[in-house]
Amino acid sequence: MTTPVWPTEMQEMDGRLFRGWQVVAAALSVLFLSYGLQFSYGVFVSGMAAELGWSRAKTALPYSIYVFAYSALSAATGRATDHFGPRPVIATGAVLLGIGWGTSALVEQPWQLNLTLGVIAALGMSVAWVPCNATVSRWFTRRRGTAVAIASSGGSLGNLIVPTLAAALVTWWGWRMTLAAIALFSAAMMLLAARYMVRDPESVGLCPDGERPAPSAVVASPGQSLDEVCWTAPFLLLIAIYFLTWVPVFVPFVHAAAYAEDLGLSKLAAGSVISAIGIGGVVGCLSSGVLSDRIGRLPSLLGIFALQAIAFVAFAAAQGIAVLWFAAMTFGFSYGGGVT
């Protein structure tokens, strides 16, 4: 009698890496491109304001609309991912993201930026975080924290690398051409990455973590429905926790550099504060995911939120670059770890 060979065993026999890590790499790429573009906005603000004669408030309002809109729309894109799978959802978002950010390079009036950035780009950005992490989570059980951490680090890497690149390009091309070029490149690369976003391991004959189930494993019966879960106290508390967490999260991203200049620091030193947030974010994403696999999600989350509170106290107390770097790296670590 021939012993059956499980798909994961066949995969190990031919020496190929578990396909779930390919999905992780694709998700990391999507988050790197989308969040790198998002966190570069501050690089374009000064040139935009100078050319168009806008105040800082006029450049900040469209970004605020954008953040609110894509956060609210994430619930819809999560449902769309469940129904249609991540590939078409992320591909559609990539096109909208490219159109929204790309046409933002053409604006002449504030209402135009409210539309291109606050609506069109927000629709595209809403496909980034939730669909990517929901898909990665389906591919892993035992190593879920580690896998989500690696994928999530894409956003922090984008924060670290893309604004610096954008700043260099702005000096050569100006803000309009640089913004359009980065938008179109990011959209094209996101379309490529979307091809590798497979819904779940079962759809290609594999199992989570690349492991075969025990022969005696029993399929779990369905639990609560989505509507039932949405009205449970833990779920509502989780929404409240993250709502309160995200209220101040974008303040350092948008205003840390200007805050540093207000303290008398040079533009170079002010820019390094944003880079410090990115460094802390990468470390926070990677370490918190691994740590949460070992000690649990709740203890990890409590420690991360405590660090976020410390970071904001440090920002308020800062008088020089050393404390600002400490605050920025601590904030980046807590931000990266919290979202992971």
Image (cartoon, grey):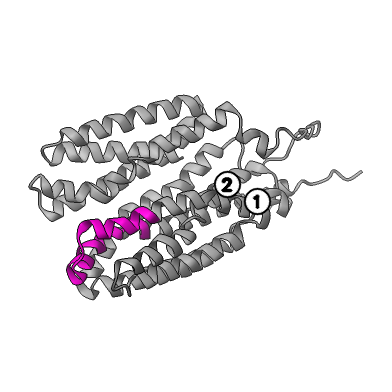
Q: Is residue 285 left or right of residue 270?
A: right
Do tag 2 and tag 1 residues touch (Cβ < 8 Å)? yes
Query: Within the magenta stretch, is there residue 307?
Result: no
Q: Nearer the viewer, residue 243 or 28?
A: 243
Q: Is residue 216 left or right of residue 264?
A: right
Query: Nearer the viewer's eye, disc 2 or disc 1?
Result: 1
Residue farthest toward the right in the current orientation of the protein: 1
Q: Residue 263: image x %, image y %?
A: 10, 44
Secondary structure found at label 2:
helix
Lower position in the chain sequence, tag 2 or tag 1: 1
Residue 299: which quarter of the image? top left
- Residue 4 in the image: above or below residue 334: below
Q: Which residue is mark 2?
A: 134
Q: Residue 239: image x %, image y %?
A: 50, 35
Q: Residue 301: image x %, image y %?
A: 44, 29
What is the distance, in whole Å, between disc 2 and disc 1 at their CAs?
A: 9 Å
State the residue at coordinates (32%, 69%): 179
The quadrant in which the N terminus is found is: top right
The span picked out in magenta is 37-65
Q: Residue 110: image x %, image y %?
A: 30, 66
State the residue at coordinates (62%, 55%): 80
State the residue at coordinates (17%, 36%): 323
Q: Nearer the viewer, residue 83 or 191?
A: 83
State the residue at coordinates (24%, 62%): 45
Q: Which residue is mark 1?
A: 82
> What amino acid is found at the position of numbered circle 1 in the picture?
Asp
The answer to whether any part of residue 42 appears in the image is no
The answer to whether any part of residue 55 appears in the image is yes
> What amino acid is found at the position of numbered circle 2 in the picture?
Ala
Would you say the magenta stretch is mainly helix, strand or loop?
Answer: helix
Q: Residues within 10 Å of mark 1 (few under 14, many from 20)?
A: some
